[in-house]
Image (cartoon, rainbow, N blue to C red):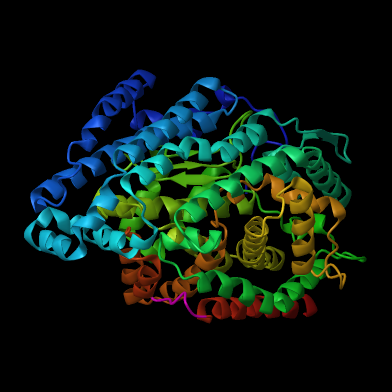
Amino acid sequence: MAETTLTAGQDRERSGIDDKYKWNLADIYPDLGAWRRAKDAIVRELPRLREQQGKLGSSAQVLADALENASRIDKEISRLAVYAGTLADQDTREAGPQGMQQEMQQLGADFKAQTSYMEPELLRVGLDRLEEFIAAEPRLHTYAFYLHDIARRATHTLSDHEEKILADAMPLAASGHNVYNILANADFPYPTITLSDGRTARVDPSGYAELRTLPNRADRENAMSTFFRALGSFSRTFGTMMNANVQRTAFYAKTRRYGSHLEAALDGPNIPVSVYMRLIDGINRWLPSFHRYLQLRRKMMKISDSLRYHDLYAPLVAEARLLFSPEEAQREILESMQPLGKDYREVVARSFNERWIDFFPSTGKRSGAYSEGGAYDVHPYMLLNYLGQYNDVSTLAHELGHTMHSYYSNTTQPYALANYPTFVAEVASTFNEALLIDRVLRNTTDAATRLSLLGSFLENVKATLFRQTQFAEFELRMHQMAERGEPITGEALSTLYLDITRKYYGHEDEVCIVDEYVRHEWSYVPHFYIGFYVFQYATSFTAAETLSEKVLAGDQAARTRYLTFLGAGTSKYPIELLKDAGVDMATDEPLDFTMRKMNRVMDEIEESLEA
């Protein structure tokens, strides 16, 4: 495999990256001027959204006109926001794109304010009258699910005036996340360390992600301790930002008369609170299997003393450190997608050839990875910070899963039904990861490489199932602290995080030693600013493992159900969408299936090590 030219922590200017590795935002708008003209046109249209106020119950035609107009404007706002957000993420130091994002937050709030009368008014019209309208006006069939959902959420819908106040507060409510984004990606004084070979490396999020995988144990410990302690020196600031975020959640939950922050977050997609709690309880029940994995990791790494937290990202098999150029990664992924058919693979190839992807890290670029499908009439966009390791190939496959989910939904459903629920959002991504590792394993004969790949599966279980549930438990207890009126400070959150992390990793039993500096890890996780999001990585992982097993076994009906699921958008509630695909998330079956598979993989590794 070819090694990428980027080294850990290296400053790399965007201008030095070949265009073929950068996304082409001109597909959304040809230039900033076109974006500005489109935005100004929408601003002029917003006041007209109030023209149907007081008339929604007058006829089916009037209601259809109002909903179609609101949907059209919402679609254009989403397109504008994608352009502003992706442009800003290219270089978070640039003030202009950051200002554009702020404009879009305000425009989104203005749109919500102008349409805030709709749901209270539709509740006054009543479900019986709305049913008559749906039967009489074909255009309303698109909005039938939405109209029925309004009736379901009636208890938590406020008056016209109160709904407008909540909408007007949206830009203020986003302050904690906005400040975090700038501090973490643009302004934070990330340190530089000297490695054992004399090289220096900057320990920013992208650099840390690579440095923690280095084969030299002292280098890993140096990188991790330096990174987390640097974050800890800003503990008060991170705590204040997180408190602002938690108080936002508290404000909306109380105002809408929910019993808890969690209930408020899950009611929108109609997910039972029991699903969240079942996941946490189930993972705690399966912690012995996780500890078995940690003990196996220690054995595979040939560590003579205790496994430590800074050992968790190093290659399990040092001599099998796989490296892939972007082109090699693309070929592997295309081959792995064969079970999903020709049409699926052709769209994946388009994403590679038509510059839907921004590959490499560069100075000021947003860390991490994502897929953005909000430009409904264009195509999805993917941001990566690609370093060439197998994990990066897996991340590409992961984000392509999101992209294909968006593509199928956007091309199958009208805009009003295209934005699939967050609860199912991670199914397609982890499904693709399962296809990738199956393909690579089937074509690997070298024993060390096979061990490494089996270890990668276990790493995915660790990172997506156990780690994200650990995050979910931390987030739940953080919000419960706020509900009890306890202070949300950096110190309090760090203490809570360390306690939970040590429980998960068996610190007291010396399964894995979690050093004191790990207490600051929570402060660099951006997902905590998106209320109760992370648990869905874990639930989606178990759903994807269950569904992909059937497709890989050649079950054509399972493949058809899965592709139908990708195009279903928001046509049903997420629990029902997954039931249609073939998995029931209200039971223990998906988690137990995944854990049995994890234990089978560990059995194979142990047998190989003993051979």
Q: Verify whether residue 585 appears in magenta.
A: yes
- Residue most toward the top? 33
Residue 557 found in image quarter: bottom left
Q: Verify whether residue 269 appears in magenta.
A: no
**Residue plotted at (82% across, 49% down):** 220
- How far from the left and from the top, in percent, is residue 368? 59, 44
Residue 24 found in image quarter: top left
Characterize the magenta stretch by its predominant secondary structure: loop
Q: Is residue 24 visible?
A: no
- Of 50 and 304, the residue lying toward us: 50
**Residue plotted at (63% across, 68% down):** 445
Q: Is residue 72 visible?
A: yes
The answer to whether 362 is drawn above or below residue 509 in the figure is above
Q: Is residue 45 left or right of residue 102?
A: left
- Of 512 and 482, the residue lying toward us: 482
Q: Which residues are magenta?
A: 582-587
